[in-house]
Image (tube, helix red, strand yellow):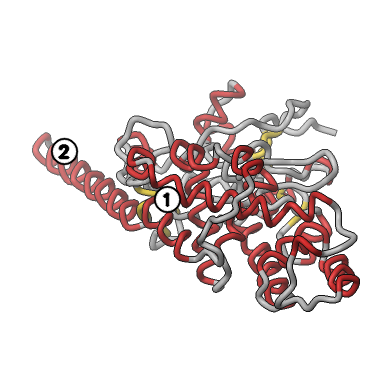
Amino acid sequence: MNAATSRIRGAALAAGLLLAMQGTASAAEADTRSGREIYERFRAGLAEPACPATSNRYARQYAHAPKQLAERDDTLAAFAHVVESMRAAHLPTEYALIPFVESGYKPSARSPAGPAGLWQFIASTARNHKVPMRAGYDGRMSTVDSTKAAVRYLKTLHGMFGGNWRLAVMAYNVGEGRIFSALKRSGQSARTAKAESLQGLPEITRAYDDKLHAISCVIAQADDEPRWLASLDRPVRRLAPVATSEALVAQHPVDSARSENGDSLLAGLVPNVVAGGSGAARLGSPAPGTASTAGTASPTAATDVAAGAVSAAGALVSTAAAESPRRHTVGVGDNLWRIARRYGVTVGHLLTLNGLDTGRLLAPGTVLAIDALPRR
């Protein structure tokens, strides 16, 4: 090959990489929407938008909610997904505030008593509502998987209690049977019942709807502060589900007591994933907190795509405890380069050991082998 031909091919390759980078950025821009738009959709969907008698106690308790939405991209992205899910199901957006009470809007939240995830489902409830749970993957830690189940359950409760959102959220907390019993004792019907007058319910259940109303008012009134409202004028990533690798889970199972997704911020989700023609995934935007301009592909992300490196947008998350042989539970934000650097191995080693190829996303919850299994 002569020098001229080599230069022409090099220029063509560079042009192709530039087009790929631009296409990735365009896809990222198309896969976002404004935080202010989400806020307006939340307000428009409230069953009780007026705030004449908000509990001062709970208003103070959840006064941090607007700041959390303004400052944390992961919280705003999860909130946006939940709000849109409620609107699509024609449910009041008060229901989108349940994760503030249950988990502080942290998909990685886990209670010592057993509930886990954004919506704090116990395992049996999660399975009953078709949340995927198996060795190596706990769908309760996925905002997409768990929200789909929560919407299905809340839609059932909303209809069961005649559209009375306050009774529905109390039933979410304590179970529908207890609410029906309380209605019977109080001589009230579901549609017109006054939640505060129901008898025989735990105090925490009585307070549940008051908490949600207080949070809704705190957020709805936050737009009195122009700087807060302006902070929402930024692109918010859409969240998309990512299938787990059944082959890897089968190859490197974890015992059921440890089948969790680590401490991932948005476990089970990869924002800005655009399917390529071959089924490979390409990244859209940089991780929260990076210096890149929101809504466009960072040079690092675009280079990774062009080089075929496996990557996912999001914050780097903690791993499962080291053991021999070591294993790593993938969380959102993990990529092969970061994992390899963390454990002092090469990317090629991880690819070979786990049977991966560079065009495949690492699905949150997948368990990767770090060391070769000992010979028997």
Residue type pointed to by label 1: Arg
Q: Quick one: SS at disc 2?
A: helix
C-alpha distance separating marks 1 and 2:
40 Å
For the point 32% across and 38% down, the residue is 298
Residue type pointed to by label 2: Ser
- Badge 2 local density, few (<14 within 10 Å), some, or many (20+)? few
For the residue pair 97 and 288, the one nearer the viewer reads as 97
For the residue pair 255 and 202, the one nearer the viewer reads as 202
For the point 72% across and 29% down, the residue is 326
Query: Cβ–Cβ below 8 Å for labels 1 and 2?
Result: no
| Residue under numbered circle 1 | 237
In the rendered image, residue 259, in percent from the top left (x then y), is placed at: 77, 44
In the rendered image, residue 119, in percent from the top left (x then y), is placed at: 69, 53
User: Nearer the observer, disc 1 or disc 2?
Assistant: 1
**Residue 311 visible:** no
| Residue under numbered circle 2 | 6
When asked about the image quadrant of residue 104, the answer is top right
Extreme-front residue of the structure? 52
Figure label count: 2
**Residue 116 visible:** yes
Query: Where is the C terminus found, in terms of image quarters?
Result: top right
